[in-house]
């Protein structure tokens, strides 16, 4: 079942020089990088991307984090890639992420109450198409 998914290497991943390692792990599993770009997220892109969270109390912190530096957006392709990349990414909170996952091996709690977790990946085919359109201007 060939699919596409979107990943975002978040500002902490880019700042810490982990872009290559994160992409290496995805490619090592046999998935393809079909498109990639580095950019600084705009508040408008983030509001569209995180539309379900815009009215929640934590959203301002998410927006501040995601605009704090450049991100890398990539379209990744392959069989069952959505499920696979989410498994590779690990649990949302780096402390809870299993060893061997991106967040489990490379993430940590910085002690400031903020979750900086290196990577976003789409959670389903519908969200992948919507998110690819936000970051690349077209759907999957």
Image (spheres, rainbow, N blue to C red):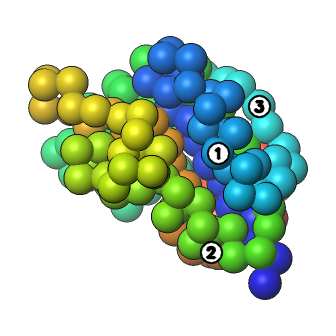
Name the residue located 64 percent from the left edge and 45 percent from the top edge: 25
Residue mark closest to the camera, 2 vs 3: 3
Q: Quadrant of the N terminus?
A: bottom right
Residue 5 image position (x, y, % from top left):
68, 61
Q: Dot 1 lies on which element?
A: helix
Q: Dot 2 lies on which element?
A: helix
Residue 63 visible = no
Say whether marks 2 and 1 touch (CB < 8 Å): no
Report the side of 48 relative to 39 (left or right): left
State which quadrant residue 139 falls in. Answer: bottom right
Q: Earlier in the sequence, mark 2 or mark 1?
A: 1
Report the front residue among 136 and 43.
136
Residue 25 is tagged as 1
Q: Dot 3 lies on which element?
A: strand
Residue mark closest to the camera, 1 vs 3: 1
Residue at the outermost right position: 34
- How packed mark 1 is, by other alpha carbons closer than 10 Å (few <14, some 14-19, many 20 or more), is some
Please tell me whether residue 34 is drawn above or below residue 19 in the rendered image: below
Q: Which residue is mark 3?
A: 37
Report the front residue among 105 and 46.
105
- How packed mark 3 is, by other alpha carbons closer than 10 Å (few <14, some 14-19, many 20 or more), is few
State which quadrant residue 118 falls in. Answer: top left
Name the residue located 22 percent from the left edge and 44 percent from the top edge: 95
Q: CA distance from mark 2 to mark 1?
A: 24 Å
């Amino acid at each position: 079942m060939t699919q596409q998914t979107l990943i975002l290497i978040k500002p902490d991943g880019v700042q810490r020089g982990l872009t290559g390692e994160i992409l290496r792990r995805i490619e090592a599993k046999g998935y393809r990088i079909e498109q990639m770009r580095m950019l600084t997220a705009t508040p408008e892109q983030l509001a569209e991307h995180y539309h379900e969270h815009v009215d929640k109390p934590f959203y301002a912190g998410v927006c501040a984090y995601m605009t704090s530096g450049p991100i890398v957006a990539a379209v990744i392709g392959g069989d069952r890639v959505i499920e696979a990349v989410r498994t590779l990414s690990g649990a949302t909170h780096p402390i809870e992420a299993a060893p061997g996952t991106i967040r489990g091996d490379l993430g940590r709690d910085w002690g400031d109450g903020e979750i900086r977790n290196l990577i976003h990946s789409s959670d389903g085919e519908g969200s992948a198409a919507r998110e690819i359109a936000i970051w690349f201007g077209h759907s999957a």
